[in-house]
Amino acid sequence: MTAAILAPSQADFAALCASRARMMADGDLLICDAVDELQTVAERSGLIAAIGQDAVQNLMGEAIAAASLVPDLAEPDELAEGCEAEIMLRAAELVQQWELADPRDRWRHTGERRPAVRPEPSARREPYAPAQSTVEAFWHVVRTDDPDYLSRWLADHPADAPELFKLWKARRC
């Protein structure tokens, strides 16, 4: 009885590609030797038949490209410090661009005099209007067609009465 060779999963093959890519990045393996080895594994395991040659090459290419992006540093902390320094520099440049674009902050970078701070103008007060619930209650009382009840209700709402009268008058016209 012969044992059937099962095709490795894409994840397994990608992991194999990543391990070979790390070896290439370290200088322990030439790219041509790694690609030949990975192609042979993909052919013999049936992975090419399962997912196609293009997909296999994409897996290899992604792993090799990712490994080539990682700089060769003696200390891993150097990479973190370098990245953090780059982030801080870019953030400072961005803040400077924003401040140069804003006339209130431009003086920080141009040597201009600091602009005088103008007080905010006071907000105009909106004219009084009764709450929508009060307006709806008013129309309910009007629909009862009871003048005494309407008089008592309006007496309980003295601030709203003038505006409600305007609404009533506008509807009758």
Image (spheres, rainbow, N blue to C red):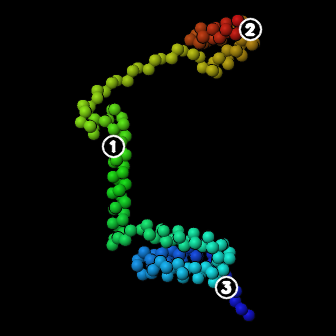
Residue 172 higher or lower than 135, as above or below: above
> Three-letter amino acid code at disc 3?
Ile
Which of pointers 1 and 2 lies earlier in the amino acid sequence?
1
Residue 105 rendering spot, x and y as whole percentages:
32, 35
**Which element carries disc 1, helix, strand or loop?**
helix
**Which element carries disc 3, helix, strand or loop?**
loop
Question: Taking the image as drawn, is residue 154 in sight?
Answer: no
Residue 44 higher or lower than 118, as above or below: below
For residue 105, side relative to residue 7 (left or right): left
For residue 7, side relative to residue 118 (left or right): right
Q: Residue at x 71, y 16 (%)?
A: 140
> Three-letter amino acid code at disc 2?
Asp
- Cα–Cα gap, marks 1 and 2: 70 Å
Which marked residue is nearer to the observer: mark 1 or mark 2? 1
Q: Residue at x 59, y 12 (%)?
A: 160
Q: Callout 1: 10 Å neighbours few (<14), some, many (20+)?
A: some
Residue at label 3? 5
Q: Which residue occupies the extreme front position in the image?
A: 32
Between 21 and 126, the residue placed more toward the observer is 21
Question: Taking the image as drawn, is residue 21 in sight?
Answer: yes
Q: Residue at x 26, y 31 (%)?
A: 114
Residue 172 higher or lower than 55, as above or below: above
- Cα–Cα gap, marks 1 and 3: 61 Å
Residue 35 rendering spot, x and y as whole percentages:
53, 78
Between 104 and 171, the residue placed more toward the observer is 104
Q: Which mark is residue 159?
A: none
